[in-house]
Image (cartoon, rainbow, N blue to C red):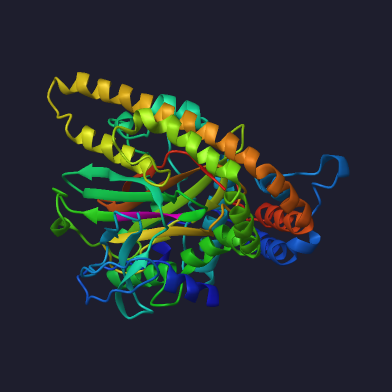
Amino acid sequence: MARRLAVHAVALAAVRAAYAALILGLIGGLGLATVVLSSRGDRPVTVAAALGIDRPAGELERRRSEAVAALVTDCMARLGLRWSAVPEPGPPIPDPDLGPMDWAKRWGFGVSTTIGSPPTDADVDPNMASLEAVAPAVRDMYVRALHGEGRIPGCHATATDTVFGVRERLLASLRPALDALDERIAADPAAARAVATWRACVGPVAGGLAVERRSLPVALLERFAARVGSVGSGPSSVAGLAALRADERRVATILAECELAYAADRSAAAAPYEATFVAEHREALKGIGSAIRAAEAALPTLQP
Amino acid sequence: MDRFRLLLASCVLLLTMGLPTAAFGAGGPAPAEPCVPGTVWEDTASGVKYLCVYDEVYGGSRWELLSRGQRGSDGTTYRSSSYGCLFQTVGLSGLSGGGADAVSRTYRWPCATMRDRIVQPPGEIRSRIVIQRFGGTGWRSCRDSGYAYNTSTSFGWLAGIDMGSSADCGSGSYRVLGFGAFYQGGLWRGGSLYTPSLWLP
C-alpha cells in the first residue's frame, strides 16, 4: 500500500539529527545563544534592533518550508508511512522586494493591476497525486496521519507548529511590556498630531469616505474592487481597465506617501519612550532575539 | 500537546453544513443573526468583525471575533468554470499590532452565492497568513502561520496570527500576505491577496 507513494531520497537519520538540534535550540536558546548587540557605544534604541530577528523574507521562507517537509516526512516514517519531502510553496506576490512606495507606484493596491496575471505555478503536489492512486481506506489512513483526527493533531500540524511556532512561543513573554509601551506612546500629544497630519494628507483621495486609519484603506480597496467589477469584458474595457489601473496606482501612491510621513512622525514621537523601554528590557530583548535566531538556525534541512 | 489543544480551541475550525446556531460573545458587539459556519459579520459602526466557525471544543457553531479594525482585502483569487472558485479574505489590524487572518472558501461554478459553496475533504483546503515588516532595504518575515489544512470536511479554512496589541517585531511598516488553495482536478488551485503596508506601533 504505502510503497505506491513516491519517496525522495531523504536521509532520515540526518533529518532526525537536525530535528534534535532544533529542539536543543528551542530549549537552550535563551542561555546558549550568542550575543550580537553588546557594544556599549552601539546599543540599539529600538525594539526591532534590540531583537535583531530581521531576516530576508525569502531566505527564512525557504528554510521553514524545508524544515516542515523534513519533519512531516520523519513523522510519517515513524508511523510506518512513506511520504515525499516536498517543500510547500512560499507566498506569491509580484515584486516581493519592492518597498511600500515603489510597490504602490507599480501595483497600486494589487486589485485591478493583477488582473490577467498568470496563475502561480506551485500547483503540482506529488504526494497528493500518489494519494489519488491508492485505495480509499489507505488514503484515509494517510489523511488521518497527516491532518489528525478530532483533537489529535497530525504530522503536518505538529511540524508546522514546531517550525512556525518558534516566534510565537518566544515572543509571548514580551507582549505585555510592548502593549504598555504602546499605551504610553499613544498618550503623547505628538502621536495625536501625527494622526491629524495623516488625515490631512489622505483627505484628497478619500473621496467622501471616512478619514480614519482603521477604515480608509480597506474602503478604498473595496471601492477599486467594485470598479473592477463594472469595467466589463468588451473591447472598450481595455481602455477602461487602463484608466482604472492608473487611478488605483495614483491613490495607492498617495496613501503610501501619507503612511510614510505618518511613520516618520509617529516614530519621532515614540523614540524617547522606545529608547527608555529598550534600556530597561535590554537583556530580555537580547535573550529572546538570540533564542529565536538559534532556533531558526537549527531548523532541519533537506539533503540535496 | 496542551498547545495543540489550545490551538484547536482558539484556531478556527470551519465546517461545512449549516449547523445549530449559537452566538458566542468574544468581546465587543456580538452578531445577533444566525451563525452559519463560514459567514463573516461586520459591525459597520465599529469595524468589529466576527467569523462563524464550527468549534469542536465548544460543541457547535459560534461567532469568532476577528482582529479588530482590520485593514484588508477580499476577492476571488481563483476562478474556473471547471474546478470552481476560491474566495479569500485577508486582514491586518489597523490600530494596533493585533494580528491578521486569512480565510479561504471554496465554491462551485458559477460561484455566485452562498448556495454555491462546495465542501472539500480533509487536507484539501489550505490557508496561510504571513506578516512582513519592511526593514529599510527589504521585507522581512516577522510572523508566519505556515499552512493550515482543513482537518475535517469543510468549505473554508482560516489561518490566523495573534500578536497582542503591539507588533511582535517592533514598530514599523507591515504588510500581510494571505494565500490559500484547494485541491481539485489533480492540482492545487489558489491565489493570494495582500494588504497595503501599514505602520504598526
A283 relative to A263 in the view: left or right: right
**Which residue is at a point 75% across and 62% down the rendered structure image?**
A30
Instruction: Give x and y (percent) for residue B14.
Output: 31, 66
Residue in the picture at 33% in, 50% down: B89
Identify the residue at image location x=44%, y=36%. Answer: A199
Magenta stretch, overall SS: strand
Is B102 in the magenta?
A: yes
Q: Residue B33, image x and y in percent? A: 21, 68
Q: Position of residue A27 (x, y in %)?
A: 71, 67
Give the percent coordinates (x, y) of residue B173.
54, 40
* In-front residue for pair A166/A38: A38
In the image, residue A116 above or below residue B43: above
Query: In this image, A218 relative to A160: left or right?
Result: left
Q: Quadrant of residue A250?
A: top left
Part of the protein shown in magenta: B100-104
Q: Nearer the viewer, residue A6 or B75?
A: B75
- Viewer can see residue A96: no
Q: Is residue A225 visible?
A: yes
Instruction: Classify residue A25 as left or right of residue B156.
Output: right
* Viewer-nearest residue: B16 or B34: B34
Rendered view: B11 above or below B140: below
| Residue in the foreground of this view, choosing between B201 and B146 | B201
